[in-house]
Image (cartoon, grey):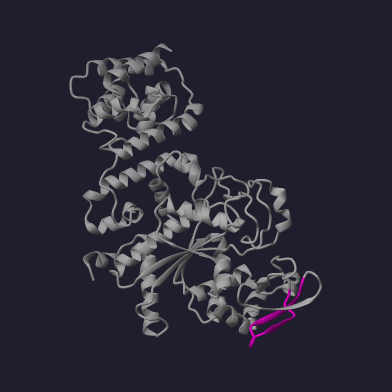
Amino acid sequence: MTDLSMLAQSAKAWPFELARALEKRVAEQVKAGERAADAPVIFETGYGPSGLPHIGTFGEVVRTTMVRHAFEVLTAGKYTTRLICVSDDMDGMRKVPDTVPNPKSLEQYLQMPLTTVPDPFGTHSSYGAHMNARLCAFLDQFGFKYEFLSATECYKSGRFDAMLVRAAAKYDAIMGVMLPTLGPERQATYSPFLPISPSTGRVLYVPMKHVDAKKGEVTFTDEDGTDVTLPVTGGAVKMQWKPDFGMRWAALGVDFEMFGKDHQANAPVYSKIARILGHRPPEQYVYELFLDEKGEKISKTKGNGISVEQWLAYAPDESLALYQFQKPRVAKKLHFDVIPKAVDEYLTFLDKFPQEEAAPQLENPVWHIHSGRPPQWSSPVSFALLMNLVAVANPTDVSQLWGYIARYAPGSSPQTHPLLNELAGYAMRYYRDFILPAKTFRAPTDQERAAMADLADRLRTFPDEPTGENLQTMTFEVGKTHGFENLRDWFKALYEVLLGQEQGPRFGSFAALYGASDTAKLIDEALAR
């Protein structure tokens, strides 16, 4: 056992807590003879390809990747691991998305498996294949290490056959789990098997007239009124989504899966199905769902959230990974106004990491975001400070900001600080789209005017090399000199009169970045307005 794996035994970060539970599970299975000692440990995530991958897809894969890495460190490489991403592409198409070309042309394919629906974009063999390609491209852009599995291919290739035959043999036991979860009307027509109609190609939600456990066959009434007998193997049928969850766990030997709170009530059902099929349910982790700016649950249908693409237009993906890492079991607002704070928190954690001992490093989010190898470079300028620089410098190009930045952080350049260069571009976009439209400047009171004029004079004649600290101290002194009982009111006045907003970064840091003389000029212009 390495020093790092020993530290991981007591690390409190939630990926390590899950990793320790998973290690215990695997050790118990090996001891009981339920698995080979060298069998890979399987992590799984699922994806519904009826729509595009979204922020929930990113969150599930990035969080699972964090647990996978924590497990590998904890066990010091004792086990091989695999992360499988399964696309439920054999599901019937329930409705035609409004976003596809010529949606009416797809209405004739409703309830057909997504992998038999033609691709409206004309680039792949089916709608399901198109969406699967979009998923893989989405995951690849973040560098995730995963294996993609198509549910259709698993059903048709025989990968699920053994479990499907066992499900036929255990049909009554599965029905015993499912029926109590359904209403009377649904109970009358329910079947865990969904046959694919030989006459129409649609996924049928019909009761079974007979289940032959020995032959692994089911008999049902097809849409044309005839009774049809099909094998449960070879892709002739699929399973209802709840039994499918448990069957997939059993067929793929899944050891760990996490899912959103909307699955929490059904998790015991998935586990019971897996046990019926002879597989110990995987370790599971339920995370909270995100809320919109009004505190309401985010819905893909409503479009009331923020997409990955929208987040990445204003911030690096590491900031989004941090937001996913922090308090996964707490419902959090996911809207544009959380982005700046997430960026600056990421920078803070990145700055701390090199100064920390090994044990605290394992608790630092950047260790988990970067799989134990966070970059050494950070940003000497915060995102909030950059946005305020944008507010007063009014640049048309990032290069125009670098004169201020290089003076504030000597020796820095786009080449030596690529993250800072990216952040400058993000700050310009975020300021333009969200801060500028909400700006409201106000006139100063007589007390504020006198204090600001004094501050401008002191900035023009500042005797020392300006730094964030000494300029902040001087600004405090000016506030005290002019009788501000609560210095927060003094700084709030600076932000409202000079920047048109109620709050901002440390004023001294802003003045150091923008320059003492330029800040004095900014005050003069504001007082003359």
- Name the quadrant of the C terminus: top left
User: Left of 236 or right of it: where is 438?
Assistant: left
Q: Work out whether 179 lies above or below 329.
A: below
Residue 84 visible somewhere in the drawing: yes
Q: Quadrant of the N terminus?
A: bottom left
- Magenta range is 207-222
Q: Which residue is drawn at 36% across and 25% down?
A: 490
In the image, 98 versus 116, the foreground residue is 116
Of residues 519 and 451, the one nearer the viewer is 519
Q: Is residue 226 left or right of residue 281?
A: right
Pinpoint residue 333: horizontal percent, then vertical percent. Answer: 50, 47
Can you say whether 157 is above or below 314 in the image? below
Q: Does the magenta stretch include residue 185?
A: no
Picture quadrant of residue 225: bottom right
From the top left corner, tell me how far across and down residue 176 is, in percent.
65, 80
470 is higher (above) or lower (below) than 74: above
